[in-house]
Amino acid sequence: MQDHYQRLFFHLEVHEPSHDFLVSILGRVAQKRVLSARVRMGVFSTLSLGALVALFPAWQELRLELVQSGFSQLFSLLFSDGGTLIALWKDFVFSLAESLPFMGISFFLGSAFIFLFSLRSLSRVISIFSYRSNNIQVSV
């Protein structure tokens, strides 16, 4: 039985595509990658610039909320009056948590996270361009 299969596959004609067809396909794949990388570079550069611009007002808002909420005065008690804080540590922790400006912190950290994420993604896209220009030579 195995002998029949070997004879069958031995006499089959092998059809391979032409070399120009392969080069054409690889050229189109490379073009699509470059187009995709350019779009991603535009999106991530705009996103990183917007997040960087948003960091400055977020920092100002965070500083303003820290001063207005009294968090900085409560936090300074930690270093100035340690004996009283040991006795009343539960009340101190709750007062500190209540005066913490969560909106300012979340706005600042969100802007910083978006900036760092988009900067990381932008560097990956730029590395695609440098890899393409150094190593891939496809003629269409």
Image (spheres, helix red, strand yellow):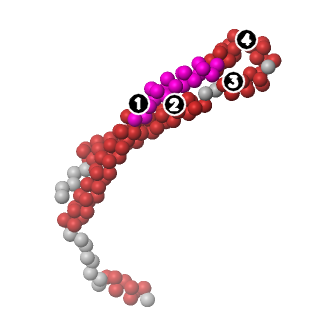
- Residue 80 percent coordinates (x, y): 69, 10
Q: Quadrant of the C terminus?
A: bottom left
- The amino acid beneath tag 1 is Val
* Up/down of 85 relative to 35, above or below: above
Q: Residue at x 49, y 25 (%)?
A: 59
Q: Which of pointers 1 and 4 indicates the residue nearer the eye?
A: 1
For the N terminus, which image quadrant? bottom left
Q: Please tell me which residue is depicted at 25% across the width and 44% down the height of the picture.
A: 134
Name the front one of labels 3 and 4.
3
Alpha-carbon neighbours of circle 4 within 10 Å: few (<14), some, or many (≥20)? few
First in sequence: mark 3 or mark 1?
1
Could you tell me residue 89's position as x and y percent?
Answer: 77, 21
Residue 53: mark in rendering: 1
The alpha-carbon separation of the residues under discs 2 and 3 comes to 19 Å
- Is 66 situated left or right of 78 in this image? left
Q: State the extent of the magenta-drawn residues as a range.
A: 50-70
Residue 116: give x, y in percent of width and height: 45, 35
Q: Nearer the viewer, residue 100 or 3?
A: 100
Gap between marks 1 and 2 measured at Cα: 11 Å
Residue 81: which numbered mark, if any?
4
At label 3, which amino acid type do we have? Leu
Give the residue drawn at x 21%, y 54%.
138
Task: Answer yes or no: is residue 2 visible.
Answer: yes
Asked if disc 1 and disc 2 are in contact, CB closer than 8 Å, the reply is no
Label 2 sits on a secondary structure element that is helix
Query: Secondary structure under badge 1?
Result: helix
What crowding class fits label 3: few (fewer than 14 Cα within 10 Å), some (14-19), or many (20 or more)? some
For the residues marked 3 and 1, what is the alpha-carbon distance in whole angstroms?
30 Å
